[in-house]
Amino acid sequence: GNSVTQMEGPVTLSEEAFLTINCTYTATGYPSLFWYVQYPGEGLQLLLKATKADDKGSNKGFEATYRKETTSFHLEKGSVQVSDSAVYFCALRNTGGFKTIFGAGTRLFVKA
Amino acid sequence: DAGVTQSPTHLIKTRGQQVTLRCSPKSGHDTVSWYQQALGQGPQFIFQYYEEEERQRGNFPDRFSGHQFPNYSSELNVNALLLGDSALYLCASRRGLDRGTEQYFGPGTRLTVT
């Protein structure tokens, strides 16, 4: 079946450090891939998306590239800020478009 | 333009009781999905409604049921509550069923079953 696996947290970084959160997926067909962010006490927000192989999604300095050959969609940011502290969820939606499958989430702490 | 709204914000119920949660989608959206997010976990898909019909269902028992109204708003009903039903319930809306369309989430309803 379809699934998403992301690196376990928490991830603790100093401000201005480079961030990578790994995400791999299992799916039939050609899924769309998403990263969502959940700030403390808030709901889920879409951070970025990619709908086909080799697409790069980007937003607020975050980037992720849809790699079909490695079934991956790793999230990266060149210089994190304290305000980036949140839980990040990788997700996929497969052909048919009915449900979104989420990973377990990775908590990021950024220290000043 | 209001985003996705949910009510109530918090709810405390006793085992065996029934609960109804409500969701109003973002303006222009006609598809509503419900998710259960247990503490420290990712959201789990419960079901999705489009054109007032349940289109797909996740691995949840029949105690979980829903409805979509002609104005696209939706309700989630849970009967015979168990302690394990305690979670954040998220509603999400989008336009249509294409796999690439963006989905917007509401702030959630925190359900505590005692």
Image (cartoon, rainbow, N blue to C red):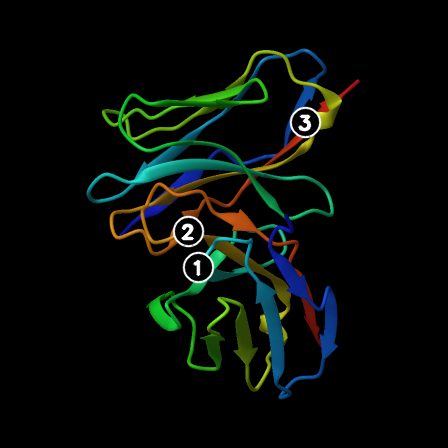
Camera-nearest residue between A12 and A110:
A110
Q: Are marks 1 and 2 in contact (CB under 8 Å)?
A: yes
Mark 1 or mark 2: whose residue is earlier in sequence: 1
Look at the numbered disc 3 and give the secondary structure of its residue: helix
**Residue corresponding to mark 3:** A84
Circle 3 crowding by C-alpha within 10 Å: few under 14, some 14–19, many from 20: some
Question: What quarter of the picture does the C terminus of chain A occupy?
Answer: top right
Q: Residue at point 68% right, 11% down?
A: A16
Looking at the rendered structure, the kind of residue marked 3 is: Asp
**Residue corresponding to mark 1:** B30
Q: Residue at point 26% right, 43% down?
A: A27
Looking at the rendered structure, the kind of residue marked 2 is: Arg
Which of discs 1 and 3 lies nearer the camera? The answer is 1
Number of numbered markers: 3
**Residue corresponding to mark 2:** B95
Residue B9 on image: x %, y %: 73, 64
Where residue A83 sits, quadrant-wise, is: top right
Residue B17 on image: x %, y %: 64, 87
